[in-house]
Structures are given as structure tokens and as C-alpha cells.
Image (tube, rainbow, N blue to C red):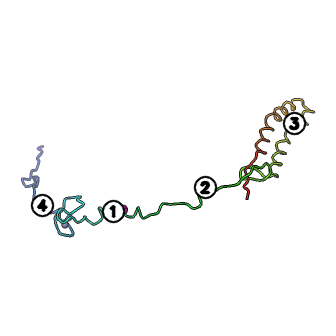
Amino acid sequence: MVHTVAVDPGSGPKVGGWAADNWFVDRCAHCGAVLAAGAGWCGQCFVPIGGAAGAPAASAAAAAPATTPFAPTGAQPRELLTRSTRWAKTPTTFGPAGRVLCTVGVLVPLLVMIVGGFVDMFAWGGAAVYGAVIVPWAMRDIWKAGQVRVG
Ligand SMILES: [Zn+2]
């Protein structure tokens, strides 16, 4: 079998000529001059191509100084008269009812352990640790002074 490769003498690379026809899309809308591909300005009359290349940046720069700096009226520092309290409810601490409730909640297990010690002596060991470590720690948290606003 003989492989034949058809070679068309006329199918060689076309040179020149027709390629220039592609440029018709890049003509200046103002003066009709042929533009380089991707050009932002017409080389003859200096009109921006499409009018969109340089316009947005210019308008944004012009508008920026006009905007007034944002000044939140509610964020200014205020002088707050506060006093510390161990009874009143504050944003960070319980009110009296909550404090007493927490205190009872902390002391009840201690009482249970003390009472239980009469049944099992080991409970007193737990009560000692609980009363020496947990209760003071909890009391400090429950009864810590909070800052309450005055006036
Ligand atoms: Zn032009």
C-alpha cells in the first residue's frame, strides 16, 4: 500500500492581505482612525476607546474627597459614674436573689457531705476539701463586687 500525501500547491501559508480586514472592529468612533488592538486611546484624536477606560477611575478619585469621614455618634466615650456593689444586679454579676440562690446551691452539697459524714466518715474528707477549696472559690465569684452605674 502506498501512502500518498495530497499537497495542494495553493494551501500554503497566506501572507499579508486579508489579515488587515480584522482591524475594522478597532476603529476610532470619533475620527475613524485604525487603532492598535487593546489601545485605550485613539492615536490620532486621543479620544478614550469606548469612553470607559479612564473614566471610572477619574470619577472615583473625584468622588472620594466629597465623602465625609464616618463619625459614629453613639461610640464617643462617656463619663460613667459607677460604684461597686455586692448586692445590686450588674451586667456582670447576679442580683441579691441570684447570689443567695448560688450560695445555697454551693452550700447544699457541703451540708449533704457533712450530714453524710455521720454515716460514712469519708464524706467528711470530701466536705473538708469542698469547704476549703470549692466554697471560697465559688463565694468569691458569686459575691464579687460589680460596677453599677450611678446617676
Ligand atoms: Zn480618533
Residue 39 image position (x, y, % from top left): 22, 59
Mark before the other along the chain sequence, 4 or 2: 4
| Badge number at residue 27 | none
Query: Would you name the residue on which mark 2 appears?
Result: 77
Disc 1 is placed on an element classified as helix
Pair 3/4: label in front: 3
Mark before the other along the chain sequence, 4 or 1: 4
Count the marks: 4
* Residues shaded magenta: 57-61
Quote the CA–CA distance across marks 3 and 4: 102 Å
Position of 129 with respect to 7 (left or right) is: right
Q: Please, what is the three-letter code of the amino acid marked with disc 3?
A: Met
Instruction: Report which quarter residue 107 is drawn in.
Output: top right
| Badge number at residue 18 | 4
Residue 50 included in the magenta stretch of the image: no
Quote the CA–CA distance across marks 4 and 2: 74 Å
At 13% from the left and 61% from the top, the residue drawn is 20
Which image quadrant: the C terminus? bottom right
Disc 3 is placed on an element classified as helix
Label 2 packing within 10 angstroms: few (<14), some (14-19), many (20+): few
Pair 2/1: label in front: 2
Residue 58 included in the magenta stretch of the image: yes
Quote the CA–CA distance across marks 3 and 2: 51 Å
Tell me whether the residue at label 3 lies in contact with that at label 4, contact meaning CB atoms closer than 8 angstroms.
no
Residue closest to the eye, 89 or 37: 89
| Badge number at residue 58 | 1
